[in-house]
Amino acid sequence: MVALLGNPNCGKTALFNRLTGARQKVANYAGVTIERKEGSFTSPDGRAYRLLDLPGAYSLSAHTPDEAITRDVVAGKRAGESVPDVLVCVVNATNLRLNLRLVLEIKRLGLPMILALNMVDVARKRGIVIDEARLAQELGMPVVATVAVQAGGERALVQALDAMALTEKAAPKSLDVIDTVSVEETQREVRRILALVCHEKDDRGNLSEKIDHIVLHPVLGPIILAVLMFCVFQAVFSWATVPMDLIKDGVDGVGSMVKNAMADGLLRSLLVEGILGGAGSVLVFLPQILILFFFILVLEDCGYLPRAAFLLDRLMGGVGLSGRAFIPLLSSFACAIPGIMAARTIQNPRDRLVTIMIAPLMTCSARLPVYALIIAAFIPEREVGGFVSLQGLVLFGLYVTGIVSAMLVAYFMKRSMGANHQQPLMLELPSYHWPHLQNLALGLWERCKIFITRVGTIILTLMVLLWFLSTFPGAPEGATHPPIYYSLAGILGRGLEYIFAPIGFNWQICIALVPGLAAREVAVGALGTVYALSQSGDELAQSLTPIIAASWTLPTALSLLAWYVFAPQCMSTLSVVRRETNSLRYPLLMAGYMFVLAYSASFITYRVALALAGG
């Protein structure tokens, strides 16, 4: 077994992907590799290898849960894990001063090691010359050059692995050996080795540092960040129009074909109103989700996101959080689950807990279909100032509201939990580079696959269940309302309406809120099913937007938007919070405080909107 380990941002996971062909996430910020990942490959000589990708670490004196995982694996302290036969230490050739400290620490354990000198192409472009033979002599281990992002860039490492003759499995020394040498002495040894093997006098300068003079400027930096985020949300609406129309027309066409080809009955109702009216109304928002993720992946891969964390450190410090919480919170824009798991990289336990508790307030992609539906129905498609989309502006405002709310909740939680000193942000800023198209395409494909899988499994299942509850037992003789009014779902919705009527929700919206507890985007599909079954004869429409535009008032629409800014979490997120905190208290607290916030925000929004409208 071979284990890859190294500092964050050294290209370790990219090298793992190159060796195994595994479809792993490759990101450009610290902490992306939270869990141990495993793969296998066979060398040209026919030798089979099992490969572990361990979490990034700066030292074996673990300060975070992910560093503890790496420490325990290499020291043979992790239950169910055997000690690796070979350790491959991956280092960034442009930043050996930081990377070699971990290498020297691991060397003291006495395990077979290979040093993979990664990103040598970048070092050569900068004029940095490294004497690989002398470095191997000083470290007492093989040193090979690798370029993880290029085909064949792993070849020298594979050859070095084949050349190692391991007669028997080595046992690591005690972890106590790490502390026999002080950090200061280790750093002196790093400087001594670098003076012998690394020649930087021809370094032509780091372009990233020149860019950072502008990007990290105390005035220009936040402006650039705000403009970037604003442009992203404008693009979500303006770029998605054509593909959304194509998907909508396709779903409508299939629905018309099914309706014309089948006789009226339960099966046709299930296919048209249940499946196409429900799952199809969610699928139409796929282009907007992919556009949002396209920009996030580009900013992630080019190296900008750690800069954003640096820029926001002072702002987040004002509410008692470190800028390191930015990356888990940003991950929550995709889904709160990976954001909550990424909080493991935060050293301070109190900061980690607060980050977990506010992560769901970030506007996850599951909210986007709900936002897009209501905005398209009630916000006119026009430009403000001749170039800014009003719909995109409203969407941007909803995301900002979620962020501001998260900061306020964090401020309250930090004060109620007892104030503690703010830890300074220590974050490695990787060099800028052009995004890798293969990684970008892979990330978008994975996101598309996840969304379509949810539509085809969770959402479809819930839509069929909702159709059943909305169809039976059926309308009695002489009924004056649509059949769904008398169904099990209708009875439930009318019961919940007593609770939600003060915030403007009708019984159809109340029905949609229930399956939305499983996955937020299901609410759109539920509304599609409910309103499809609420129509009769020629009034049946495939498009949900004109139906709700005609059925709801503007105060109700604004109230529902406010609800979904704070909407209680889906069950899967609460289960992850339970697992990460090892307590039932915190998921219950999360669900409770978010329900109170959602109801309060909706109540205020609805009443203010009614007053302004003269109602």
Image (cartoon, grey):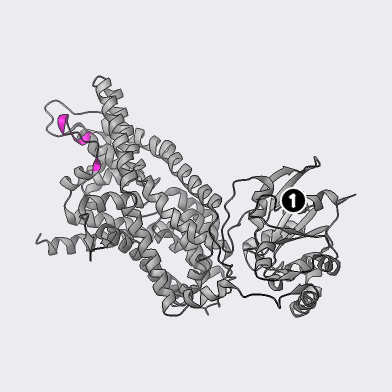
Q: Quadrant of the C terminus?
A: bottom left
* Residue numbers of the magenta segment: 533-544
Whether 514 is among the magenta residues is no
Q: Residue at x 71, y 44 (%)?
A: 40
- Residue hosting label 1: 155
Foreground residue, 249 or 553?
Answer: 249
Can residue 484 be spotted in the picture?
yes
Amino acid carrying label 1: it is: Arg
Foreground residue, 290 or 511?
Answer: 290
Q: Residue at x 49, y 51 (%)?
A: 575
Q: Position of residue 240 (x, y in %)?
A: 34, 49
Q: Residue furthest right?
A: 167
The vertical placement of 346 against 78, above or below, is below
Label 1's element?
A: helix
Figure quadrant of residue 467? top left
Figure quadrant of residue 508? top left
Compared across the picture, whether 237 is left or right of 306 comes to left
Q: Position of residue 478 (x, y in %)?
A: 11, 27
Q: Position of residue 474 (x, y in %)?
A: 22, 28
Q: Position of residue 80 (x, y in %)?
A: 73, 49
Foreground residue, 446 or 121?
Answer: 121
Foreground residue, 235 or 276?
Answer: 235
Whether 534 is among the magenta residues is yes
Q: Residue at x 19, y 29 (%)?
A: 475
Q: Residue at x 76, y 45 (%)?
A: 49
The vertical placement of 236 against 466, above or below, is below
Question: Dot 1: few (<14), some (14–19), or many (≥20) neighbours within 10 Å?
Answer: some
